[in-house]
Structure formats: C-alpha cells, structure tokens
Image: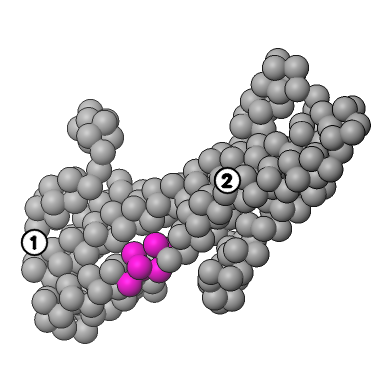
Amino acid sequence: MVLGVISIFVGMILKGAPLSAMNNPAAFLIIIGGTFSCLFIGFRMDQLKNFPTLFKKTFFKNNLQSSVELRQTFVELSQLARREGLLALESKIQEIDDPFFRNGLSMVVDGMEQEFVSDVLDAEISIMQARHAENRSMFSQAGTYAPTLGVLGAVVGLIAALGNLNDIEKLGHSIAAAFVATILGIFTGYVLWLPLCNKLKILSEQEISQKRMIIEGILSLQAGDSPAAIEAKLMVFIPQTVRETLKED
C-alpha cells in the first residue's frame, strides 16, 4: 500500500503534475464519504460492524496452524488411539485451540457415526464459506463504487470549472482539481479495496484447506487408520516444496 502511494506521487512529480492539486477536500469527501455511504446503503449494520476487523485482518499474519504441525498432531493422536483406544483422545480435546478441530474430535470420542461427523463438519465449512463471501463482498463493492464516484467527482469539478470561463487562471486550476476525484476513485478502488478483497479470499481459501485437512484426519482417526496411513493421507495437503524438505529430514 505504501508502495502504491509512493508510485502515484512520484509518478505525478515525473509527469509534472502539481502535488498541491491533491489538497482537495471536496474530492476526498466525494470519494471516501461517497464510498462509505454506498456501503451503508448496501449492507446491514451487523455486517458493517465487521469491516474494521476484516480490514485489520488483511495486515496481520493469520494464526492458523501450519499443515506440517497439523499432520504431526494427527499422527500423535492416532498413536495414542492405537495404544489406548479412541476414548483416550478425550484428554487431548481441551489442549486443542481450534474450535472446529475440538468439535470434530469430541464427536468422534462420543461415538457418533462417521457419516454424521462428516456431514456436520462439511456443513460448518459451507456456512463459513458463505459468511466469508458475504464479508469480502463489502470490499469488492467498495472497489466498484469508488472509481464510478471518481467520475462523478470529475463531473462536479468540471461543472465548477465551467463557471470560471471568464478567468483563464481559475479555469485551469478548476479543471486540474476536477480530475483529483478521478485519481482518488481509481486509486482507492484498484489499489486498496479490490486487492484487500482478493487477500481476504486467499485467507479464506487457506482456512478452508486447513479445515478439509482436519476433517480428513478426524475421519481417519475414527476409521482406525494407522499412523503411517494418516500421515500419507494428510501429506496431500502440504505443498510439494515442503514435502521435499520433510523427506530430506
């Protein structure tokens, strides 16, 4: 984001555009205020309350357990289950931080049918996918609104410019100011909102992949697969480059 801002300002300097033109409160009001007003119209308040949290989430590393660590956890659980039975896993449930993992393992320990466990966990993933899509749609919509509002801002600026036809100096300044809104609209749309939307999509896909791995591991535990078999099954969720490193170790 910093690189994007630097690129725009340095580009303006190289093109000879006056940076003073960016001192345009009206343009900022139209683009920033206009974009958020559109969001307030298009989304419910309970959805918009998540906006700051989602925005912050894109700037910090997620706390998902790595696929390598997850595979090792399942191998250890399978070894314990082989020695002492599935009921022995009950002592490990509270040590697990992930509620999804904890819930799945609890159902296995409680002796629920494998098909039921699979259906419940799959349903939870589907609901999570829908929730994630709904949340990131705020960013994709903002990315759609902002450039269009930039055109609106330019039109408003040109209307003001046409009111100064008798003053050539003011006319030039007004025309330059008119396009500041267009710059802000395109910049916020394509350098801020849409890239953040894409990042939220990537984070969602990573979380879904991890949960798919957890389901595979839980169902394998319930089926009584050997530690070696579980390790082989879960290896498919680990990137090829990481697999090569594990083989070398």
Residue 232 appears in the rendering? yes
Q: Position of residue 83 (x, y in %)?
A: 15, 66
Label 2 residue SS: helix
* Identity of the residue furthest to the front in this view: 166
Q: Position of residue 162 (x, y in %)?
A: 79, 40
Residue drawn at point x = 54 percent, y = 59 percent = 54
Q: Position of residue 129 (x, y in %)?
A: 34, 64
Q: Position of residue 198 (x, y in %)?
A: 44, 47
Which one is in front, 246 or 100?
A: 100
Q: Residue tagged by mark 2?
A: 147
Residue 57 appears in the rendering? no
The segment highlighted magenta reads 127-133
127 relative position to 217: left or right: right
Label 1 residue SS: loop
Decide whether residue 224 is among the magenta residues. Answer: no
Label 2 CA crowd tier, 10 Å (few <14, some 14–19, many 20+): many
Q: In the picture shown, does residue 233 fall above or below 23?
A: below
Query: Disc 2 residue type?
Result: Pro
Q: Quadrant of residue 131?
A: bottom left
Mark 2 touches mark 1? (CB < 8 Å): no
Give the image's coloring scheme.
Answer: one colour
Number of the label disc, if any, that sits on residue 225: 1
Which one is in front, 84 or 234?
A: 234
